[in-house]
Amino acid sequence: RDSVTAKLTIPSTLIPSKDCRDWVVPAFSYGPEYSIKSYDPEIEKLNPFHFDNINCTWAYKTDPKKWHPIAEAPKTPVPMSIIFICLIPASLAAVLLYLDQNITARLINKADNKLKKGPGYHLDLLVLAGVILISSVLGLPWMCAATVRSINHLFALSTKEDVIGPEGQRKEQITEVLETRLTGFAIHVLIGCSLFFVTALKFVPMAVLLGLFLTMGITSLTSIQLWERIQLLVMEPKLYPPTSYVRQVPMHKLHIFTAIQLVLLVGLFVIKRSPAGLLFPLCILLLVPIRMFLLPKIFTKRELRYLDSEEEIDGEDVG
C-alpha cells in the first residue's frame, strides 16, 4: 500500500494569501482578520461579519452565502501607541537581519576563499533595507543572505586542490573562485519560472526538500571552525590537525572554548524554540559582551587571537 507523505503547499493562483487583504498592506489600519470572531448576539451588533479562520473569507451575518469584495471590508485605525510599541520588536528584527546578513557576508569573504572582488558590506545592507521595505508594504517574507546556500554556491564556483602541509598533513584548499553574477541571476530566473510548474511541484514530498537542506547543511559544516574543534573532543591528540589554534593554544583551553560555544549554541536553540523566541535576536546580541568582557577573564589575549581567527595565522608566536 502506498504511504502518504506531506507535500509542498503551493497556491494555484497568484493572489494574496488571505482574501481579506489587498496587495498593499495598509500602514495605519488593519482589516477584518483581527476583528471580533463571535456569534454572540450582543457582539454581533458591533461586528456583523463572519470570518473563516483558515483563509479569512468574510460575509455579512444576515446573508452568509453572499460574499462581498475586499474593498468593502471594514478597516480599523491603528492607535498611535501601537506604532511606538512596535518599535521594540522591529528593533529586535533589525538586529537579527543585520547579524544574519553580515555573518554570512563575513564567512563568504574570508581570506581562505581567495576572492578577488572586495566586499560591499554597506551597499549590501542598503539594498537589503530597500528590499525589506518593499516586502513589508506588500506583506511578503523578509529576505537576507542565506548562510548555508551562500556557502554551497561559493563551493560550486570554486576550484580546489589538495595541499600538503609542512608536517605532511593533507588539506583541501580553494585556489580560485569564478566570481560571476550570471549564476545568481540564473538561479532567480529559475525560481520565477517555477510559477509555471506549480501543478508538478505540488507532488514534491516535504521529505525530499528537507533532505536537500540537510545535505547542504552537512556539506557546509566543513568550512566552520567550530565543527572542526567539536571533532577534536573525541579525537586522539596525536591525530589533531596542525592548525594554528591547535599549535598555539593549550589543549584544555581549546576544549573549554569549544564547550562554551556549545553551551551558548544549545541555549540559543532552546530560546528560539520556546515561547520567548521573540527575544532570540537580543540573545544573539548578548554574545558580544560575553566575548568582550567574559572570555578575556578565562583566556589570554593571545589565545583568543588564535581561537577567534577563521583563517590560518602566519608568523605564529613562540611561547
Image: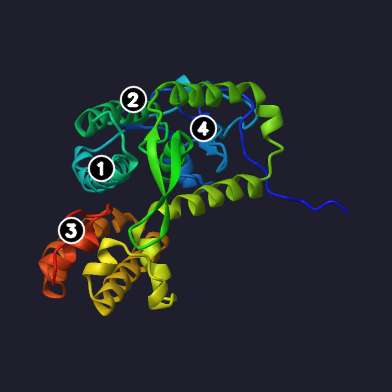
Which badge, 1 or 4, is on the more N-terminal residue?
4
Q: Give the CA distance from mark 3 to mark 4.
A: 40 Å
Q: Is residue 211 above or below residue 244?
A: above
Crowding at mark 4 (Cα within 10 Å: few <14, some 14-19, many 20+): few
Say which residue label 3 marks. Answer: 288
Say which residue label 2 marks. Answer: 134
Assign a secondary structure to mark 4.
loop
The amino acid sitting under disc 2 is Ile
Q: Quadrant of residue 239?
A: bottom left
- In x, y percent, where is residue 284? 26, 57
Residue 53 in view: yes
Q: Give the CA distance from mark 2 to mark 1.
A: 17 Å
The amino acid sitting under disc 3 is Val
Q: Which quadrant of the figure contains the N terminus?
A: bottom right
Q: Give the CA distance from mark 1 to mark 3.
A: 14 Å
Is 210 in front, or is 299? 299
- In x, y percent, where is residue 236? 43, 77
Q: Residue at 42%, 61% (x, y): give it.
A: 273
Tell me, yes or no, whether the two marked residues, 4 and 2, touch with CB atoms within 8 Å: no
Q: Quadrant of residue 241?
A: bottom left
Say which residue label 1 marks. Answer: 98
- Residue 87 falls left or right of residue 3: left
The amino acid sitting under disc 4 is Lys
The amino acid sitting under disc 1 is Tyr
Crowding at mark 2 (Cα within 10 Å: few <14, some 14-19, many 20+): few
Q: Nearer the viewer, mark 2 or mark 1?
A: 1
Say which residue label 4 marks. Answer: 18
Q: Give the CA distance from mark 4 to mark 2.
A: 19 Å
Q: Nearer the viewer, mark 3 or mark 4?
A: 3
Q: Which quadrant of the figure contains the C terminus?
A: bottom left
